[in-house]
């Protein structure tokens, strides 16, 4: 299975989520309850292979695949 293009992932994410917007984050995809965080940066590519974003109050960056944008007003 081919990995997603990280540059397309950040482009798509940044088109929908702006710095300061809320996202739901899952430590392990498909398990547990999501935690709501605010984005601290735009999404970026880490090491030419992984799409990540920095979240306010979370140490280190997280993979975009673990984040789900929250609709405005939700």
Image (cartoon, rainbow, N blue to C red):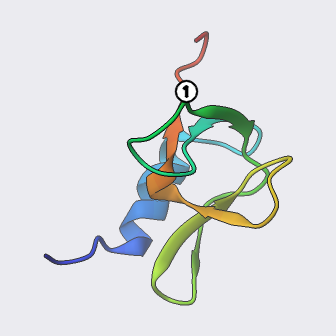
**Quadrant of the frame with the C terminus:** top right
Label 1 sits on residue = 70
Whole-percent x, y for residue 27 in the image: 57, 50
Q: Position of 62 compared to 66: left or right?
A: right
Residue furthest front as drawn? 32
Q: Position of 6 compared to 55: left or right?
A: left
Question: Where is 53 relative to 29, above or below?
Answer: below
For the point 79% across and 51% down, which residue is it?
Answer: 40
Q: Residues within 10 Å of mark 1 (few under 14, many from 20)?
A: some
Q: Position of 50 compared to 52: left or right?
A: left
Q: Quadrant of residue 72?
A: top right
Q: How many marks?
A: 1
For the point 51% across and 57% down, which residue is it?
Answer: 64
For the point 75% across and 57% down, which residue is it?
Answer: 41
Q: Can residue 52 be seen here? A: yes
Q: Can residue 21 be seen here? A: no
**Quadrant of the frame with the N terminus:** bottom left
Q: Quadrant of residue 26?
A: top right
Residue furthest bottom as drawn? 47
Whole-percent x, y for residue 8 in the image: 37, 66
Residue furthest top as drawn? 73
Question: Where is 58 relative to 68, above or below?
Answer: below
């Amino acid at each position: 299975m081919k990995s997603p293009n990280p540059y397309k992932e950040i482009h798509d994410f940044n088109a929908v989520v702006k710095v300061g917007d809320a996202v739901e984050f899952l430590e392990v995809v498909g398990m547990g309850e999501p935690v709501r965080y605010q984005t601290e940066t735009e999404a970026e590519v880490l090491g030419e292979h992984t799409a990540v974003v920095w979240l306010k109050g979370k140490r280190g960056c997280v993979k975009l695949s673990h984040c789900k944008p929250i609709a405005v007003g939700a």
